[in-house]
Amino acid sequence: MAVKAQNISDIHEDVYFIQGKNRARYPYSNSLLLDNYIIDTGISGKYLRKLTRTYKIEHVILSHWHEDHISGNHYLPDAKFHCHILDKPIIENIDKMIPYYDIEHEGVGQELEKMFTMLGMKDTPIDITFDDNEIIDIGDRIQLKVLHTPGHTAGHCSFIELSSKIGFLGDIDLTNHPYYGNIDANLIDFEKSIQRLLNIDFDIVVTGHRDPILGKSLIKEKLKNYHNIILEREEGILAEFSEQDQPINPSDLKNKNLIYKEYSLFEDFEIIAEELMIEKHFNKLESMNKIISQGIGYILK
Ligand SMILES: [Zn+2]
């Protein structure tokens, strides 16, 4: 099957949306190709190999450390790799991923390691780190601005190409499944990042796991809907507090589908991630003074 490289800019003939395998469902993701730069390498190894037959890729920008965005790095051994400094240690040492997902003691870690082997993942030395608001010049005409949008991971970044106003939002992915289930995720930061993106006038956005979205108003609507999913989860969690007489902990809210309405093929992983995401809500609610710790757990304030 041919790799779908779709020119999505009226201004730049060398900016392409590259759809990931299986329509970019996990463990694959979408990429944006800008001249000799590509953002993320999770489209699938086979797709990447095919892409490199037509396009010369000399630089790889990584939106964040998750395996489904970096798995193809080793197919580009001569490229220079760029990422935010906070995600660099994990990309350079993928053994860190298992403790970052907090699945070391759960047996699920081995499952994820099997997935890494299937994807052929390797450690990637990072050549260049970038900072918030830095502008990466690509050729004479393409200017890619870095937007540090933490929350999903600590070093997660989004990007905007300044003349075409095309955005790449990584895993602020505008699906129905906002994700903050690793130890370096932070829900308050995640919501601030969504808010920041709402204030930018994108004309087109590409995200890790869905088809491109065209048009300023539709993009803003999708960002608001995405944020609302998080707020609905929070309401569900707060409702649990009202129903309990005892102080509660995130582990008491396990298997209640408070985050995942239904579990997928990766159910064992999702149940652990769900508890971690509930913990992120507890952290946020505590810092907002909506809940307080009492004895062995938390109660409504
Ligand atoms: Zn991710």
Image: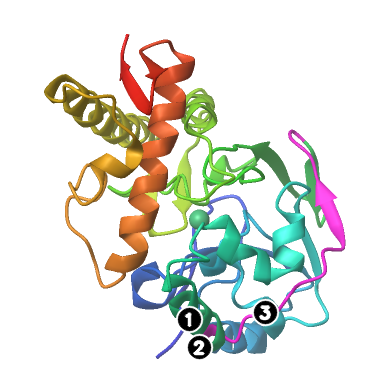
Q: Position of residue 240 (x, y in %)?
A: 18, 29
- Contact, mark 1 vs mark 2 (Cβ under 8 Å): yes
Structural distance between the alpha carbons of marks 1 and 2: 5 Å
Residue type of the residue flagged with mark 3: Tyr
The one nearer the camera, 275 or 116, is 275
- The residue at which mark 3 appears reads as 55
Q: Nearer the viewer, mark 1 or mark 3?
A: 1
The one nearer the camera, 47 or 282, is 282
Tell me, for residue 115, which label it has, or none.
1
Tell me, for residue 118, which label it has, or none.
2
Few, some or many C-alpha atoms within 10 Å of disc 1 (few <14, some 14-19, many ≥20)? some
The residue that appears at 23% across and 23% down in the rendered structure is 238
Magenta highlight on residue 283: no
Q: Earlier in the sequence, mark 1 or mark 3?
A: 3
Q: Secondary structure at mark 3?
A: loop
The one nearer the camera, 281 or 199, is 281
Q: Is residue 138 above or below residue 160?
A: below
The residue that appears at 24% across and 30% down in the rendered structure is 237
The residue that appears at 50% across and 88% down in the rendered structure is 118
Q: Secondary structure at mark 1?
A: helix
Q: Which residues are magenta?
A: 118-133
Structural distance between the alpha carbons of marks 3 and 2: 25 Å
141 on left or right of 28? right
